[in-house]
Amino acid sequence: MGNIIAIVGRPNVGKSTLFNRLIGARQSIVDDVSGVTRDRQYGISNWNGKDFTVVDTGGFVKKTDDIFEKEIRSQVQIAIDEATVILFMVDVTTGITDLDEEVARMLRKTKKEVYLVVNKADNQQRLLDANEFWAMGFENTFFLSSIQGSGTGDLLDEVVVHISERDDETVGLPKIAVIGQPNVGKSSFVNALLGEDRNIVTKIAGTTRDSIHSHYKKFDNEFLLIDTAGLRKKAKVHENLEFYSVMRAINAIEEADVCILMIDANEGMNAQDLAIFSLAVKRNKGIMIVANKWDLMTKETNTLRDKEAEIKNRLSPFSDVPVVFTSVTEKQRIFDVVNTTLEVWENRQRKITTSKLNEVMQEAMERNPPPSHRGKFIKIKYVVQLPTYFPAFAFFCNYPKHVKESYKQYLENQLRESFELSGVPIAIFFRDKS
């Protein structure tokens, strides 16, 4: 199960403030990709050495009174289905409301870990008032002030006990996830891959309760396909399709080695696509873009090359990502997608010998030495690849803290030009070697 913490509750209890505080410490790392909306609904956090994704359900509510309560109920249900831990937020200044009671009834039925978070308990009187919430019957009840931040550390200490350590070392077959927004053709793509020949597709119970891993083995290719597309066709989910699909995508990203991000070629990369892309990149997953419905494009106005450039421009600065244009309905270039995905998987495993790495990178650094810092010349002595599950490199130098971001970008570009690393996020560290 992907490590997801979902914050639920009625409006104006402080969900977004808590969300911002939880991902705030890493704000510099979890920066918005250009084009991602300001009111982000999910981000990555880290506590006690464990990474997890925090989802603010409030970001998904449409502001209309008539379906407001129905919408919140539907979100709580999706959180119960998809999250690892649920933070149920209430507000001490209003006391227990009918809607709080209704959400509580839903949450009492789940076997998931639920934490009742009583917000705005920021003075003595309010702390006394907060005691009435014990009556709601949640064993894990915490009083905090999300604006001041008091109490969040104690809450997180308890919550991360239920978050599993990441074990990203790829074992066995590549795990491939098809992610993307509703109606871009994910199910049709999965069916086109597995469809006609269902007899050679064996269903394997997934690591999550209901993610189906299909074993694909044809034309000398073999991998596990994490199919989130056709799951859970429950009526209640359709009311909240955007929220549901985001939760599915986050879970799929967690499980996968490589993500196929499917978009509509006509619409290009929109903000939600970029947010999902950004999440996969931060999780150091291999990634490729499939622009589907290419058959519906008006060919006169759009050449493939222009469209590809437009997509890559949206992905900047990490634009070394393969893009394949498909028409799933006409079964065009579906096997190109398979081959490209497996190439990305191989790139993610790539190990470069230290001698080759130094030969190439020393030449690149001689051509363009690091800019000096306040008159001090930065000298990078040597570079090694770190033993991680994705390409990461340590550059040993005399002033590791003073290497500029632009130079780091230059080194990454040189690595990409010299070694096959397309579709794979790279980490670069500077270590002290004076």
Image (spheres, rainbow, N blue to C red):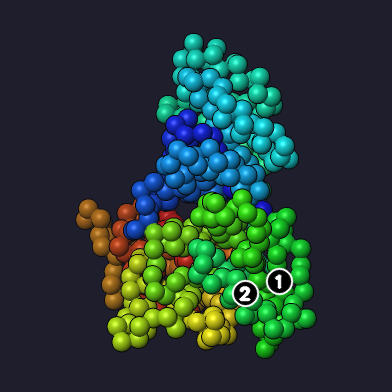
Residue 432 marker:
none
Query: In the image, what residue type sits under mark 2?
Result: Val
| Residue 82 visible in this rendered orientation of the protein | yes
Q: What is the x, y in percent for residue 206? A: 73, 62
Q: Do the residues labelled 2 and 1 touch (CB within 8 Å)?
A: yes
Residue annotated with mark 1: 214
Distance between mark 2 and mark 1 Cα atoms: 10 Å
Specify whether 38 is left or right of 422: left
**Circle 2 residues within 10 Å: few <14, some 14–19, many ≥20:** many
Residue 147 vertical position relative to residue 355 in the rendered view, above or below: above
Q: What residue is at 50 percent from the left and 63 percent from the top?
A: 181
Residue annotated with mark 2: 190
Within the image, what quadrant is residue 129 found in? Answer: top right
User: Which secondary structure lies at badge 1?
Assistant: strand
Total residue callouts: 2
Q: What is the x, y in percent for residue 361? A: 40, 74
Within the image, what quadrant is residue 87 found in? Answer: top right
Q: What residue is at 69 percent from the left and 24 percent from the top?
A: 137
Specify whether 347 is left or right of 368: right
User: Which secondary structure lies at badge 2?
Assistant: helix
**Circle 1 residues within 10 Å: few <14, some 14–19, many ≥20:** many
